[in-house]
Image (tube, rainbow, N blue to C red):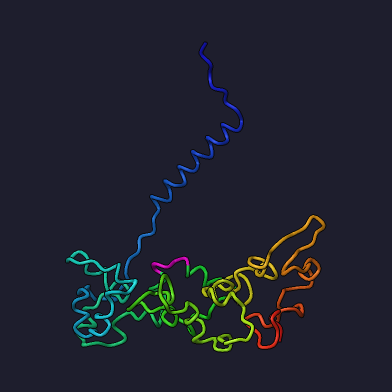
């Protein structure tokens, strides 16, 4: 006996969802962002070799830079090098240098945003580092080493970038907040968030990402063996009179001043 497949409501929904998923993937593949290097009126691309004639100190250290992976050779790849960030360099080269005939990303982050479009969106959020007073190159070195300090297997602390400006949070503390061992970005998004102080989450939700041990059937919220259910209703953990010294304390293991 031949049985026919039974088409149920769930089957139709799943099939429809799969079809829409394929359509969305197809659209995403077709509508890719096309990144073009910055332009300078009247200038043409001369290639990175030409740049190295004057900027040898930068060029000699560039081989291990994160951005060095973008370099390509050949006549058709002239603009995929120094000039992909600084713009075509013929006028700059002919003039023997200058600041008004080349693009300087440290003065204007628009060049960085051409590739890092997600960061442009984050900087537009209500709480972020003020662009103009802080630029991408204050935290990231595009010309040598990892663009993100302390990334990967580097021995340098990832906090070094933040603490170069935020000295008050450096410590050392008698009682340290272990989150600082990991990274400032455990709690903060340095490019911008919707939360005050660029926090990744707001209020006690931020702390509960790490400090959450058990919720009992009676409604207790056990943290460090103590019920915090009533405490978290008073406000943020660092403003409710409990853990004000959020980065570290010299007097109290519960991070109090």
Viewer-proximal residue among 3 and 160: 160
Q: Residue furthest left?
A: 75
Where residue 256 appears, x then y in whole percent? 71, 83
Is residue 6 found left or right of 220 in the rendered image?
Answer: left
Magenta residues, dominant SS class = loop
Where residue 84 appears, x then y in whole percent? 30, 71
Q: Residue furthest top?
A: 1
Residue, x 22% and y 66% (percent of image)?
Answer: 77
Residue 131 on the magenta segment: no
Residue, x 61% and y 81% (percent of image)?
Answer: 176
Is residue 177 found left or right of 51 in the rendered image?
Answer: right
Residue, x 59% and y 74% (percent of image)?
Answer: 179
Which corner quadrant of the image does residue 214 belong to? Answer: bottom right
Magenta extent: 114-118
Residue, x 43% and y 72% (percent of image)?
Answer: 151
Query: In the picture shown, does residue 20 fall above or below 97?
Result: above
Query: In the picture shown, does residue 182 fall above or below 134?
Result: above
Viewer-proximal residue among 169 and 5: 169
For the image, the number of numbered tags is: 0
Which corner quadrant of the image does residue 143 belong to? Answer: bottom left
Where residue 38 appears, x then y in whole percent? 33, 72
Viewer-proximal residue among 202 and 36: 202
Residue 115 on the magenta segment: yes
Where residue 74 appears, x then y in whole percent? 17, 66
Is residue 89 found left or right of 229 in the rendered image?
Answer: left
* Quadrant holding the C terminus: bottom right
């Amino acid at each position: 006996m031949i049985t026919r497949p039974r088409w149920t409501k769930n089957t139709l929904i799943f099939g429809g969802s799969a079809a829409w998923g394929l359509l969305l993937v197809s659209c995403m593949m077709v509508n890719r962002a096309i990144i073009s290097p910055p332009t300078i009126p009247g200038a043409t691309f001369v290639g990175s070799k030409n740049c190295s004639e004057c900027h040898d100190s930068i060029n000699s250290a560039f081989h291990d830079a994160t951005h060095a992976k973008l370099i390509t050779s050949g006549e058709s790849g002239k603009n995929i090098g120094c000039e992909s960030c600084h713009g075509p360099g013929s006028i700059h080269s002919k003039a023997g240098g200058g600041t008004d005939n080349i693009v300087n990303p440290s003065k204007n982050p628009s060049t960085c945003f051409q590739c890092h479009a997600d960061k442009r969106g984050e900087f537009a959020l209500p709480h972020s580092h003020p662009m103009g007073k802080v630029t991408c190159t204050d935290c990231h070195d595009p010309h040598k080493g990892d663009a993100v300090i302390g990334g990967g297997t580097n021995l340098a602390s990832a906090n070094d970038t933040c603490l170069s400006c935020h000295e008050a949070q450096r410590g050392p503390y008698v009682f340290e907040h272990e989150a600082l061992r990991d990274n400032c970005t455990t709690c903060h998004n340095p490019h911008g968030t919707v939360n005050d102080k660029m926090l990744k989450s707001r209020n006690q939700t931020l702390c509960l990402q790490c400090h959450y041990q058990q919720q009992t059937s009676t409604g207790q919220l056990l943290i460090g063996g103590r019920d915090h259910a009533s405490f978290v209703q008073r406000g943020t953990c660092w403003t409710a009179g409990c853990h004000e010294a959020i980065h570290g304390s010299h007097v109290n293991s519960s991070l109090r001043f």
